[in-house]
Image (spheres, grey):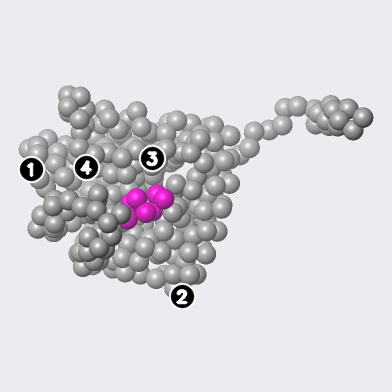
Amino acid sequence: MSFVRTHQIKSDAKICLDDIETRCKGPFEGKRQARQFTEEMNREIRDLQYRLFVEGKQSLLIVLQAPDAAGKDGLIRKVLGQMNPQGCRTYPFKTPTRKEREHDFLWRVHHCTPACGHVSIFNRSHYEDVLIVRVEDLVPKAVWSQRYEIINSFERNLKASGTTILKFYLHISKEEQLSRFQKRLENPQKHWKLNVADYTVRERWQEYREAYEDVFRNCNQADAPWFVIPADNKWYRDASVAGVVRDTLLRMNPQLPSVEVDLDEIRGYYEQELAKLKR
């Protein structure tokens, strides 16, 4: 499964998103094969996450960033949401509330990071504070430009505390985005997603890409890597992320706790209770 690492950005790489394909099929003949692969990965992810939860020593943070309609919600539903919710939670980061704005920009994020044994999924994240605030000119450059190193320190602290970090950018083309907007218009069940801002923000498409490229250059530590996932094909997007998450959990190698009881004694009690039921 070497293909799952082909989308990882090297820590010293200079990324130009215009040079990276948005439509890819990888090793798959088509969507059916990719979906079978995703199902296999999901089964392994569920087992590994169970071990992670029971072990209670490590944690996993998954960060999702993307333009509108690139498929963060779909990816969570089809892949990441397959994990047991007892040890996995998703946090959507929307426009900060008044209370959140009264604190530093990481205040609302820190308490959502995963406890030992848990997985946290960020649907958007702390990176909004060097993306939207930059492009929309919400804070001065003197403020947001300092946040790269603050974010790096934040992530180093999480890593030192036993949290593994994966960061995914879902890379979609402008044409595919517009096609998905059209499908929303045609489907009454998705009209609630419609927003004029989805169209007006397209005027700043290149500005957002440049902001993301700066994120990849400034906040791509070897132990907290970014993956640029081609997302025009939803089935390839899902398969790629599932493969990366599965491989990462394998490397984390969570272990079930050692047995601390006398199994023969437990079997004896079981047989006694079984005998009572048969009387």
First of labels 3, 1 by sequence position: 3
Instruction: Give the SS element for disc 2.
Output: loop
Instruction: Give the SS element for disc 4.
Output: helix
Query: Could you tell me residue 70's position as x and y percent?
Result: 28, 57
Instruction: Give the SS element for disc 1.
Output: loop
User: Camera-side residue: 57 or 46?
Assistant: 46
Q: Amino acid at mark 1?
A: Asp
Spatial separation of the CA atoms under disc 3 and disc 4: 16 Å
Q: Amino acid at mark 2?
A: Glu
Instruction: Give the SS element for disc 3.
Output: strand
| Discs 3/1, front | 3
User: Camera-side residue: 277 or 109?
Assistant: 277
Q: Sort mark 4 into few (<14), some (14-19) or many (20+) by Cα contacts within 10 Å.
A: some
Residue at 34% x, 50% y: name it.
73
Q: Sort mark 1 into few (<14), some (14-19) or many (20+) by Cα contacts within 10 Å.
A: few
Residue at 7% x, 43% y: name it.
137
Spatial separation of the CA atoms under disc 1 and disc 2: 44 Å
Q: Amino acid at mark 3?
A: Thr
Spatial separation of the CA atoms under disc 3 and disc 1: 28 Å
Q: Which mark is residue 29?
A: 2
Q: Label 3, on which residue? A: 90
Q: Label 4, on which residue? A: 128
First of labels 2, 4 by sequence position: 2
Spatial separation of the CA atoms under disc 3 and disc 2: 32 Å
